[in-house]
Amino acid sequence: MSLHCRILVRVAVSSALGLTLSMPSMAADAQLEEIIVTAQKRTQSLLSVPISITALAGDNLSKLGITEFVDYLYRVPGLGFSSVGTFGNRGNRQINLRGISSNVGSPTVGYYIDETPMRFVDPRLFDLERVEVLRGPQGTLYGAGSMGGAIRVITNKPDSSEFDASVAGTLSYTDGGEENYAMNGMVNVPLAEGKAALRVVAYYQQDGGYVDNRPEERQPLPEYQYSESAAKLIDVRDNYNDEDSSGVRAVLTVTPTEQLTIEPGIYYQSTTADAWTTYVAEMGDLKSNFLEMSPHEETFTIYSLNVSYDFGWAELLSASSYSEYELLTTEPFDRVLPGALGLPFPYVAPYRTNEEQEVFTQELRLTSTGSGPWKWIGGLFYQQDDLTTKQRYVTPDINDDLFGGAPVVPGGRLFVFDAEREESQFAVFGETTYSVTPKLDLTAGLRWFDNDSDRYAVADGLFNGGESITDVNAAEDGFTPKVQASYRTNENTMVFATIAKGYRPGFGTVVPPPGLCDADLAAIGVTNPSDQVDSDELWSYEVGSKASLMDRRLTIQGAVYFNQWDDLQQSIDLPTCGFVLSANAGKAESKGFELEVNAMPIDGLMLDLAIGYVDAELTESAPGLGAQSGDRLVYVPDWSFSVGATYTHAIAAQMEAFYHADYQYSGDMTFNYDPSVPDLYQRDAFGTGSLRAGLKKNQWQVAAFVDNVSDERPALGSLRFLTSGTLTYTLRPRTYGVNLSYEF
């Protein structure tokens, strides 16, 4: 670890100790709430788990008005985030922990909804038990895709002891935009006391638009400037990027005996919008210049069945799930053809993508429940993942519209792409902990995996240079080990050290068409591109500590780490032919620290502080990326900082008032390795805050809030479509609102 980083760690730890020593004497009549987590696949107190975890309890999420991913991500130290693409704030997200970031291949951060591993989706955060963010490789218990860590969204389960229900509504207004509103409802119905219960959640949310469309051209366009197959044409229009989300979640819990629990469930969510949630920077703040709407829809459905049996000495869990995911997008390419074909005017033609994914997952695991010195967990994992992708840039009337009927574009096929990918994973895993003494625990874990991937793709069209076929298979197996030691200096303080390995599976890839991309490939020294991208792997070294002080009025968590990452999977742009090459390119290191402090200095006042620092850079050049050793890894902010305060006090019989303020800061980061185009290269550091105040009496609660108080416009993602301009995704502008909820 560099001297600079060591100094930063010492300053952070010294600050935390200073806060501890300077706090006033505290009475024992109130304490910080204990947070229970299941990060190690067993129920434990957050402060007793030797893993760096940020855990956000569901009650706190509700009190803070956190309803989606972007609301809590900046509260997690060491988490990096960038987003732009066909689904605006829903799509093409780059999420990383501790600087482990890549723009191709499997995610570097695992994502789970309860026991189901998922591609990243953004469920509405209503009626949750908690969100857990696990930092560092989780390869033993979570497997592939958790090289940098894992995010777990854990929902509330049915309760057979009593009836429960709640409703909540929110109405808000965005500066310069439209109103937003949401309705949420939950009902928990005991079907047989102690034996069965049903919990159902439903929600609907409409986020009003705030981007204004201002094309220079006016409708109606001349007939030769648009294809009849285009989506809805658009003229001058205000606030056209509104978005609707709706969903339902239902879980049934049946316990026919004290030992056996059966829990089937279903979770469905749909998000639709008529336009991208991006603006064109060259047009001005929150302005775009499109001639075509870009409708899109994302849906996911999870069918799950969890069955557990308690043997007394161990608990057996069977977690089965089948999930369906579909994404339909239309990209506004009305100014792409002029750039590609040299036309003096725009031509509106749709570029549509349809992704359909089906995933079956089965995990069997046996977890010890005894009180002896040995604790262990072991299991089997299987997953079948089938993905179909169809892309169409086809306009049957383009030859008549632009070329007088000459077959310049055969069949109107500018670009056609069909791909089928089938992946299977099988793993055997185990982890055991031995208490050498009442204070010292030693842990060892190992996961053996066997992965197989088949990909078949056909590409055709003018921009592909004709038909090309890809037919590749990738297979590999290996191990991800983990060793750890934890020591309790007393009953309230623990230190731990961990060495762990993480990996991502390799995959077959589509090779850029021969001839068309030869010049680009030669420029980066590639003469025979491979259709196989190998797995990349990471070794992580971490030392951390957790403490509960002053009769649990103060908690401190912190860790320092060092990661070595080899054979990075990277996506290399080929600028002339317009394709990308996926390959293993370069090596990297990341090092840094995290510190989280929670305190209750006086009754009713809650303070929280989170600081993270990441120094992530290439240690081996990647010429195809234009990247040299020492360059920063992309999508990784160096500093992250979050501070919040909540004060609650009684103002009348059975009535209390609460006030909350928070501020989050995210350091600058790069989007790529080419600094020649500043607006596509780097995002400046920014900070944003929110305010919330309300009243609670019996079952009623009302709160007023302001989000993005300073009305910040950070570039959370940027890309450029030839002559379209720089598409930028940013935070929602300053938003005022009120929330009303009632618990039955």
Image (cartoon, rainbow, N blue to C red):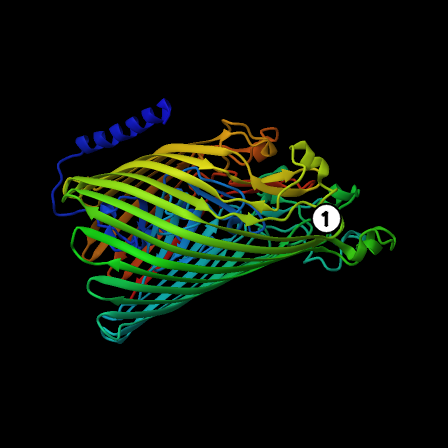
Left or right of 677? Residue 159 is left
The residue closer to the viewer here, 46 or 216, is 46
Left or right of 409? Residue 541 is left
| Total residue callouts | 1
Which residue appears at 53% of the width and 50% of the height? 91
The residue closer to the viewer here, 608 or 146, is 146
- Please give the residue where the numbered disc 1 appears in the rendered image: 464
Q: List x then y, in percent, for residue 533.
A: 56, 44
Q: List x then y, in percent, for residue 15.
A: 26, 29
Q: Is residue 727 visible?
A: no
In the image, residue 113 above or below residue 573: below
Residue type at mark 1: give it. Answer: Asn
The residue closer to the viewer here, 222 or 458, is 458
Left or right of 325? Residue 435 is left
Q: Residues within 10 Å of mark 1 (few under 14, many from 20)?
A: many
**SS at badge 1:** helix
Which residue appears at 42% of the width and 35% of the height? 564
Q: List x then y, in percent, for residue 319.
A: 36, 63
Residue 654 sits in quarter: bottom left
Which residue appears at 26% of the width and 75% of the height? 256
